[in-house]
Image (cartoon, rainbow, N blue to C red):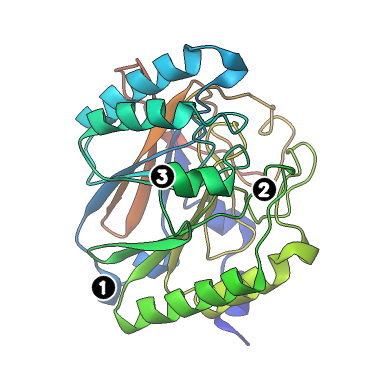
Amino acid sequence: MSTFAAARRDFSRREFLNRIWTGLGTLVLTPACLRGAESKREPLKFCVVTDTHLGYKDQTAAERQWRTTAAELAKAEGEFVVHLGDVVDGGREGQYPVYLDIRKTIGKPVHEIPGNHDPQELFEKHIRKPVDTVVDQRWLRLLLLNNSRRDSHDGFLSPAQLEWIDQKCREAAERDLLVVLCLHVPVHDNRHPDRGWHVKPANGQKEFYEIIRRHESRILALFHGHFHNGLRGWDDHTPIHEVCFPSALYNQDRKLEEQKAPGYNPLEFRPGFTLVDIADQTMTLRYKPVGVETPAVSRPLSVVS
């Protein structure tokens, strides 16, 4: 039996969800790779932002929102910022310099990936080349990939990208690094009442999960943007956490908890970013609505049967 199959056996859905706590947008997760004395890592904090969509509807609201968000990111605890895609809206090239000017005010490293609104050639021109890259921060390795296209809401992983992921995970094991994979479009096979946008089996999903299973003892989580549904996550590929992060511009409540959709969707949907705090064998995700100072109060997440 593979370690992945063993994890599926040992963690029932109820047991797994009992490890997840939520407040108004606060999740405390316990990734398997952080558990155990031999896995103890020094604390690490960083921020995650996504779907800024500068130029949205050819108006300045998104620019103003990004400026306000950047000011809060500058004050937030965290060594760096991860941006999970859709930097601009609809491939509006003139918005990249606007985004970059505001990004300078954050005063800490920002690592972006493209979204389906970011044409790869424009991302390469204004943000970074090569697009698919590795960022190592102490004991953590970020794998940043473009799995999106301008002509589709679905995600795509090429054979070359899949081979690259496998190679970089092997290298992480050799260096005793844990891994977060950052892809704009989730790989997870979500269906109604979710949006249904994901990496389909014909576009690399099967091969991707095979790689993830081989390296599951190293993988902290899969991080995604794209959904605009606040914090949205799934638990059915245990022990791997798959999380979509809240948009800095707008989010929508699709009533996923009420409809007993698989996974979890804490009831917070204001525009914002997420504070990631890894310490004491847990990974805490604190949803920070922009312009709101009051911290959320934690409570148990109701178990979805």
Q: Nearer the viewer, residue 25 or 195?
A: 195
Residue at 29% from the left image edge and 72% from the top image edge: 39
Q: Is residue 227 visible?
A: yes
Residue depicted at 73% across the width and 54% down the height: 189
The residue depicted at 36 percent of the width and 52 percent of the height is 283
Label 1: state its secondary structure: helix
CB under 8 Å between callouts 2 and 1?
A: no
Measure how far apart labels 2 and 1 are at the Cα level.
Answer: 42 Å
Give the mark, 2 or 1, whose residue is nearer the N terminus: 1
Q: Which mark is residue 296?
A: none
Question: Crowding at label 1, few (<14), some or many (≥20) Cα neighbours within 10 Å?
Answer: few
Q: Name the side, left or right, on which 120 lies relative to 155.
A: left
Q: Earlier in the sequence, mark 3 or mark 2?
A: 3
**Can you say whether 52 is above or below 16 in the image?**
above
Decide which of 235, 130 is in the foreground and name it.
130
Residue type, numbered disc 3: Ile
Relative vertical location of residue 162 with respect to residue 248 in this rendering, above or below: below
Quick check: 201 above or below 154?
Answer: below
Looking at numbered disc 2 in the image, what kind of residue is underneath it? Arg
Q: Position of residue 212 (x, y in %)?
A: 56, 72
Instruction: Provide the residue designation for mark 3.
Output: 127
Residue 63 in percent (x, y) is at 43, 18
Residue in the picture at 57% in, 64% down: 238
Tell me which numbered mark, 1 or 3, is placed earlier along the sequence.
1
Residue of label 1: 37
Q: Badge 2 is on which residue?
A: 149
Could you tell me how far apart the alpha carbons at marks 3 and 2 are, in whole angstroms?
17 Å
Look at the image and tell me in which quarter the N terminus lies.
bottom right
